[in-house]
Image (tube, rainbow, N blue to C red):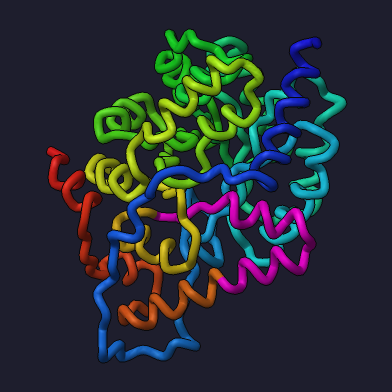
């Protein structure tokens, strides 16, 4: 199978597995986080403002439609629905890896549809760090042009690459490639993990390279090690993937690490409710990203996706009301209790 065909086929495999199989692993840590209740909130819940700003964009909510799919004809309708939701609710949205369409322009339509359906939304293109290293800034420019993006996410997925049958095991030169991109690119660059989290040390290296934001992509949500286990036909790779199902920095811990280093943060990895988004904002995130809950709704219908988003927003507003937070800025100062293993890990942060 040609490489470009294999990439597209893999994207369809990922979509089907994530929508039909149990692909989550671990604990993101949100169960150990409790927002401090304010018995006298002194605000009107119906007047609460969920609007926020991120990288110069004005958004109606901190809910971010995290990168999911694209690159195969079967992904077109899902991306269309997600884009319709981004436009309807004025949300930021990231597309899945655009590698398949960059290898084969015939597959661009599954990405192009996003800007067509969301002409005013804040959109993030998506390119892997390995592809950036191997193909240079030209591919980043093409990825942005493909969807008329407002920023680009450079995703790092070393764990998935290590287990994936087609994975790239050579990660040398990636930081230099990131530095070159940030130095020469005219769009904001977001560095995105895909489920293993980002440490404070790595965050500092990312900021030093010149990135505009970090998407922590912590452990505790969709596990790409688990996804690749389900894809693998080699028993050895299945065993390898299972051995690393608990690898990574839980999302809450990663967020607490990265917040000490400065810069805008998107918290993704195991967020499953508006309360989780509120907790993430209180802990230092600028946006809270979701993929799997929205993907499953988007696989059903437009209305199912809209209903899911509206339920998340209701939970967010109630959490803001019960902490006395009239705005997202005030929510960022809400107090939290952190317990259990999450607290123990956070206490180890220097």
Q: Residue at x 32, y 71 (%)?
A: 330
Q: Residue at x 64, y 43 (%)?
A: 18
Q: Which residues are magenta?
A: 286-311
Q: Residue at x 46, y 72 (%)?
A: 316
Displayed quadrant of residue 43: bottom left
> Can residue 341 be seen in this snapshot?
yes
Question: Residue 182, relative to residue 190: is it above or below?
Answer: above
Left or right: residue 219 versus residue 188 is left
Residue 303 point in image, percent of width and height: 76, 69
Displayed quadrant of residue 231: top right
Quadrant of the frame with the C terminus:
top left
Q: Is residue 99 magenta?
A: no
Q: Residue at x 71, y 26 (%)?
A: 10
Closest to the observer, 198 or 324: 198
Residue 137 point in image, percent of width and height: 59, 18
Question: Residue 102, relative to residue 93: is it above or below?
Answer: above
Question: Residue 171, relative to residue 255: is it above or below?
Answer: above
């Amino acid at each position: 199978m040609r490489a470009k065909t294999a990439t597209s086929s893999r994207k369809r495999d990922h979509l089907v597995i994530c929508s039909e199989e149990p692909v989550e692993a671990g604990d993101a840590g949100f169960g150990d986080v409790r927002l401090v209740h304010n018995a006298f909130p002194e605000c009107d819940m119906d007047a609460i403002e969920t609007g926020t700003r991120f990288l110069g964009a004005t958004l109606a909510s901190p809910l971010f439609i995290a990168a999911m799919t694209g690159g195969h004809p079967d992904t077109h309708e899902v991306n269309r629905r997600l884009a319709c939701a981004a436009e309807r609710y004025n949300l930021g949205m990231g597309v899945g890896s655009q590698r398949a369409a960059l290898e084969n322009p015939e597959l661009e339509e599954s990405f192009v549809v996003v800007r067509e359906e969301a002409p005013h939304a804040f959109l993030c293109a998506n390119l892997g760090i390995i592809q950036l290293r191997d193909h240079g800034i030209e591919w980043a420019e093409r990825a942005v042009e493909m969807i008329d993006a407002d920023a680009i996410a450079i995703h790092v997925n070393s764990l998935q690459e290590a287990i994936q049958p087609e994975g790239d095991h050579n990660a040398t030169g990636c930081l230099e490639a990131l530095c070159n991109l940030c130095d020469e690119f005219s769009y904001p660059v977001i560095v995105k993990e895909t489920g293993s989290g980002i440490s404070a040390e790595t965050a500092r290296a990312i900021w030093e390279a010149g990135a505009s934001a970090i998407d922590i992509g912590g452990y505790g949500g969709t596990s790409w090690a688990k996804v690749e286990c389900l894809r693998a036909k080699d028993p050895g790779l299945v065993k390898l993937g299972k051995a690393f199902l608990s690898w990574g920095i839980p999302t809450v811990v990663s967020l607490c690490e990265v917040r000490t280093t400065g810069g805008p943060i998107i918290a993704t990895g195991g967020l499953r409710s508006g309360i989780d988004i509120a907790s993430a904002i209180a802990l230092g995130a600028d946006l809270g990203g979701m993929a799997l809950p929205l993907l499953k709704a988007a696989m059903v219908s437009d209305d199912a996706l809209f209903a899911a988003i509206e339920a998340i927003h209701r939970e967010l507003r109630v959490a803001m009301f019960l902490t006395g937070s009239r705005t997202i800025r005030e929510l960022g100062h809400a107090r939290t209790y952190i317990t259990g293993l999450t607290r123990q890990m956070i206490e180890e942060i220097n």
